[in-house]
Image: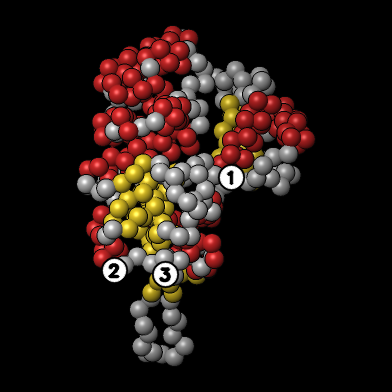
Amino acid sequence: YFYKLNTFMELIQQQRISENTEKFLLITLLVSKEWISEQIKNIHSPPLIWMLTDNAGISYQILERLEQSLHFLDFEKLTNEQLLQIRNKLKSNGKENVFGIISELDIYAFLVENSIPFEYEPIIPGHKGRVDFSIRLENENILIEVTTLSQSDKDEKFDKSRTQLTEKIKGIELPYHISFGIKELIPISEIKKIKNYVYKAMLDGKEGELLNPFPFLTKIRLKKYQDLKRVIIGTHWSGVEDLAPHIRNVLNKKTNQLSKEHKNIIIINLLDYADEYFFYNAISGDEVMNFFIALKPDAKLPEPYLSRKNKDRFLQKNFNTRVNCVVGYRYFFNSQKWIGYHPKPNKSFTDIEKQKLSDLFS
């Protein structure tokens, strides 16, 4: 039954890929039909292949925008090296590379759509490597670097711990569902101890929340099911990760590449990892709601208000003065954007430049 179900699902996915390769002709031409056909057979298919299996969701919308962006791309002005780089990044196994180049091409199309004069990947003295874009505004060059929020270190640790734990335990042929809460990376030496601990608990017929002797786990929970032939495992991170530090790390890496002699903008695609709240916490300090307590009866109190703490985390660092402003968005640059200006950059925008950029990025 499961073999037939998997085969049926594979046929549906292949049909969707076939339909999408016909619909998204420029994407298909860029990476080639032959490459797509080869990757379909691959168990660990690249992100672009998985996106091509979508027919209505966010991946499909991203492919629509990518196809549109490629229509705006001036292929005649691209060097062979640039074209090869775009192709290789789209075909990459790394989600960061794929979404990174998709974000770049999205900005490229946005600049064309808004009639902003620009250069793509020019060489700028003082800038480490090629800059993504140089736009012309009020007779001055403004440099733009585009980056994408990738999977955080914490997520990667969770994935590694989950894989190691699952591989060790999944072979137990007992009818249990095990739920683990993972707090931090599990030492390899402890994986076998966890397996032995839960295996003994199952043999003893225990159910529910177990006493947890492992400091890197938040819980171990067992539930018995008569119809199961072997163990099923569920894992999750405990608590919600604060993504602001991760956003700052990504921005700091980009800042180090910037030239001190130019006005610079960093544009960051947050994907589905973060939102406006985390974006402003990252660049302006953590948001805090301030309340007032009456010490005397009938005291008149001011209204609660928002302030930000730890403002020096990003904007006040010396090397971050190279950044004039940071723009954040999710998936599509022609949708909602958030902008934060540096209060004391090396080279300040004029009021006219700031107004034009605010209008452009609004």
Residue 351 image label = 2
Q: Position of residue 318 (x, y in %)?
A: 54, 66
Q: CA distance from mark 2 to mark 3?
A: 13 Å
* Foreground: disc 3 or disc 1: 3
Q: Which residue is mark 1?
A: 154
Disc nearer the start of the sequence (2/1): 1
Pointer 1 local density, CA inside 10 Å: few below 14, some 14–19, many at least 20: some
* Foreground: disc 2 or disc 3: 2
Q: CA distance from mark 3 to mark 1?
A: 31 Å
Q: Is residue 113 above or below residue 166?
A: below
- Residue 300 is drawn in which quadrant? bottom left
Work out whether residue 104 or residue 6 is closer to the camera in this orientation and state it. 104
Disc nearer the start of the sequence (2/3): 3
Q: Position of residue 337 (x, y in %)?
A: 32, 52
Q: What residue is drawn where x is 77% and y is 35%?
A: 189
Q: CA distance from mark 2 to mark 1?
A: 41 Å
Determine whether label 2 and label 1 are within 8 Å by CB: no
Residue extending furthest toward the front? 125
Residue 343 image label = 3
Q: What residue is drawn where x is 35% and y is 55%?
A: 141
Q: Give, as a three-letter code, the residue at label 2.
A: Asp
Q: Position of residue 329 (x, y in %)?
A: 36, 49
